Image (spheres, coloured by chain):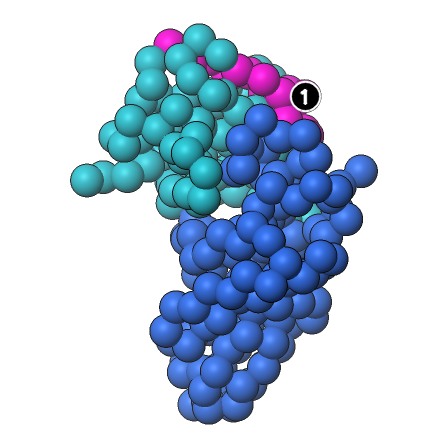
Chain colours: A cyan, B blue
């Protein structure tokens, strides 16, 4: 069981470039989400999905786009990278049944120069 | 706005020295409080879910408790391998299910000195 797989682990972008952070889970979880983690600010929710074809915005959605065409995959797109998007990005998934915590991926460390 | 506040920000303990970490929250109608452990360079790892005041959960040297306004993570006789950042999280008021759209605290960085 791989759990939640994120790629790439590290990425350097130039301002204005676009890219997609990949996230895949093999646990048949309905719920998936993207967080960014910055020093002193904790984990902040970017976008989330409660099932294939359904996505919604979290706390800090600007500059990011998501889609959920399958249960397994939930990619995060940076449309035009900015230095403020330098962060560590985590994808997480969970069952919608009560009491289950999230399973997190190992993260993508993104630097925008 | 729902808030989650953790204290202290950092805690250094000698091996075997017991202590507690605090997580206070302002969300009404709590539908669950979650504790996670995060090691450097890794994603958070789920530890516990608590639902109602008075509830307790235990795992090895860790015990989580919940009141109406806060939760405590008690660590008894810690070992160096317990060193990590401990995060708590709550769903927003009116969440459709218990672990939707979790709001995380900024964590307590725990260091256990051999």
- Residue B84: horizontal and vertical position, in percent? 48, 67
Seen in the image, is A17 located left or right of residue A53? right
Residue under numbered circle 1: A62
Seen in the image, is A20 located left or right of residue A82? left
Asked if residue A59 lies in the magenta stretch, the reply is yes
Up the image or down, B64 lies above or below B31; here it is below
Q: How many marks?
A: 1
The quarter of the displayed image where residue A26 is located? top left
Q: Nearer the viewer, residue A110 or A73?
A: A73
- Is any part of residue A8 visible from this angle? no
- Most frequent secondary structure within the magenta stretch: loop
Residue at 39 percent of width and 68 percent of height: B59
Residue at mark 1: chain: A
- Is any part of residue B114 visible from this angle? yes
Residue at 49 percent of width and 71 percent of height: B63
Residue at 52 percent of width and 38 percent of height: B99
Asked if residue B50 lies in the magenta stretch, the reply is no
Up the image or down, A72 lies above or below B92; here it is above
Magenta residues span A55-69
- Residue B11: horizontal and vertical position, in percent? 62, 77
Up the image or down, B55 lies above or below B103; here it is below
- Residue A67: horizontal and vertical position, in percent? 46, 13
The quarter of the displayed image where residue A105 is located? top left
Residue at 19 percent of width and 40 percent of height: A1
Q: Nearer the viewer, residue A14 or A1?
A: A1
Give neighbour class at mark 1: few <14, some 14-19, many 20+ (Cα, 10 Å): few
Seen in the image, is B102 located left or right of residue A32? right
């Amino acid at each position: 069981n791989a759990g939640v797989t994120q790629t790439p682990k590290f990425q350097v972008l130039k301002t204005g470039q676009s890219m997609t952070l990949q996230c895949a889970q093999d646990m048949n979880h309905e719920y998936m989400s993207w967080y960014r983690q910055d020093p002193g600010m904790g984990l902040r929710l970017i976008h989330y999905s409660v099932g294939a074809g359904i996505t919604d915005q979290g706390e800090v959605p600007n500059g990011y786009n998501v889609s959920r065409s399958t249960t397994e995959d939930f990619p995060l797109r940076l449309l035009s990278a900015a230095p403020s998007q330098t962060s560590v990005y985590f994808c997480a998934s969970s069952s919608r049944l009560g009491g289950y915590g999230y399973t997190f991926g190992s993260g993508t460390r993104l630097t925008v120069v | 706005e729902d808030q989650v506040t953790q204290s202290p920000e950092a805690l250094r303990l000698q091996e075997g020295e017991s202590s507690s970490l605090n997580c206070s929250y302002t969300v009404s109608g709590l539908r669950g409080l979650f504790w996670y452990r995060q090691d450097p360079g890794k994603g958070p790892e789920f530890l516990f879910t608590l639902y109602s005041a008075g509830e307790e959960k235990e795992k090895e040297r860790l015990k989580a408790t919940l009141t109406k306004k806060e939760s405590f993570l008690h660590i008894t006789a810690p070992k160096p391998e317990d060193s990590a950042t401990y995060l708590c999280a709550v769903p927003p008021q009116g969440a459709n299910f218990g672990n939707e759209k979790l709001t995380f605290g900024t964590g307590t960085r725990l260091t256990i000195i051999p």
